[in-house]
Amino acid sequence: MRWLHARRIFTREASPVPQPIVRIGTRGSKLALTQAGHMQRRIAAALGYGPEDAEAVAPLVRIVTTGDHVQDRRLLEIGGKALFTKEIEEAMLDGRVDCAVHSMKDVPVERRPGLVLAAIPEREDPRDAFVSPNYARLADLPQGARLGTASLRRQAQALNARPDLEIVMVRGNVDTRLAKLERGEADGMLLALAGLKRLGLDGVVRSALDPQADPPAPGQGALAIETPERLSEADWVRALRHAPTAIAVAAERGALEALEGSCRTAIGAHARLEGSELALTVEALTPDGRERFRREGRIAYAADGEAAARALGERLGAEIRQEGGERLLLSI
């Protein structure tokens, strides 16, 4: 007879579900649950279980965040990215969950005491995707067309190339945004390709933007596993780590930190391995897209090189900040 065990407690299959080993905090959107479910199966495997036991040994705990409640305003108007993580982090600090699965691009640079970003799994496609019922590329939109996005970065990049466009603010989960597009509330929309792929919706994508020409948000396409400090070196945490992704994300978030990245700043960063080197492109734009400040750099790649990667990002970001100054900040 097979036995399930958790927290040193052993029970037969016929017995009640055992005390959970790892409780995973997640937002309740379809994308968040899909991402958390993928990590749930990875965690279960790291603990020695098959996918059929995943919910018993690594249950998902749905937590509604302030960012989920408010859907009619930009994040900068209601408190920024932290509104997608605040309640989940409080649940970890209170001991109600043992870890959280976040989209890395939604994780603020400033960390809460007692919590760490313990693992970054292998990244999905970091590019932005252009979606439209009638047009294949952003460049194909007619004069004065409506482009849907809630991202200040995407807005600024689009207006830099196409100042004639009308930007339509769209928030909500992926299904909600696609429904707005179908209803004709916009002529085209920019979304993260990673999220569409994870949801099996990449068939709606008309084209993907070049990540060097239009760098995505720092960390886009990557997930972050956040834990209390006491769990940060647990075996199951170590099993989720992917060094090349962690190093690339460290470079991008170094630039984000140097630019005091927030929802008030249009920042893009794209790090990638090119042979034996880590290459990084960083840019920041004025909110209206009229001015664009870019830097590129590279360092030798090393599997333990997160600190060097972060320093590269910080250096490029600081150069842009010095050049762009207060013009980079959106007034509110």
Image: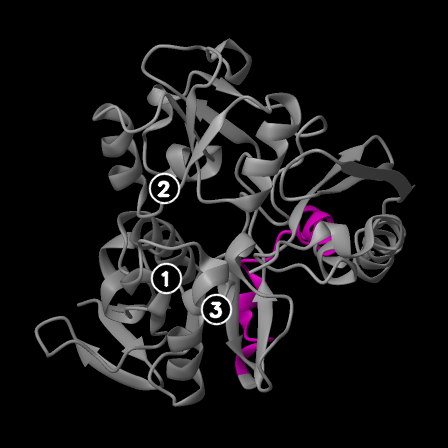
Q: Where is residue 25, by image quadrant?
A: bottom left
Of residue 198 and residue 239, the one placed in the foreground of this image is 198
> Horizontal placement of 165 versus 185: left or right?
right
- For badge 3, the amino acid type reads Gly
Residue that carries the numbered disc 2 in the rendered image: 170
Magenta-tinted stretch: 231-251
Of residue 252 and residue 213, the one placed in the foreground of this image is 213
Mark 1 vs mark 3, foreground winner is 3
Q: Residue at x 62, y 54 (%)?
A: 330
Does residue 130 sit above or below 149 in this rendering?
above
Residue 105 in the magenta stretch? The answer is no
Mark 1 neighbour class, 10 Å CA radius: few under 14, some 14 to 19, many 20 or more: many
Q: Is residue 47 visible?
A: no
Q: Where is residue 22, by image quadrant?
A: bottom left
Q: Specify the label residue 163 is tagged with.
A: none
Contact, CB < 8 Å: mark 1 with mark 3?
A: no
Dominant SS of magenta comes to: helix
- For badge 1, the amino acid type reads Ala
- For badge 2, the amino acid type reads Val
Q: Earlier in the sequence, mark 1 or mark 2?
A: 1
Does residue 99 sit above or below 330 in this rendering?
below
Q: Position of residue 131 (x, y in %)?
A: 40, 23
> Horizontal placement of 260 versus 136: left or right?
right
Residue that carries the numbered disc 3 in the rendered image: 79
Q: CA distance from mark 3 to mark 2?
A: 17 Å
Residue that carries the numbered disc 1 in the rendered image: 44
Q: Position of residue 329 (x, y in %)?
A: 68, 55
> Horizontal placement of 2 versus 251: left or right?
left
Q: Is residue 305 visible?
A: yes
Q: Position of residue 297 (x, y in %)?
A: 89, 40
Placement of the N terminus among the 4 image quadrants: bottom left
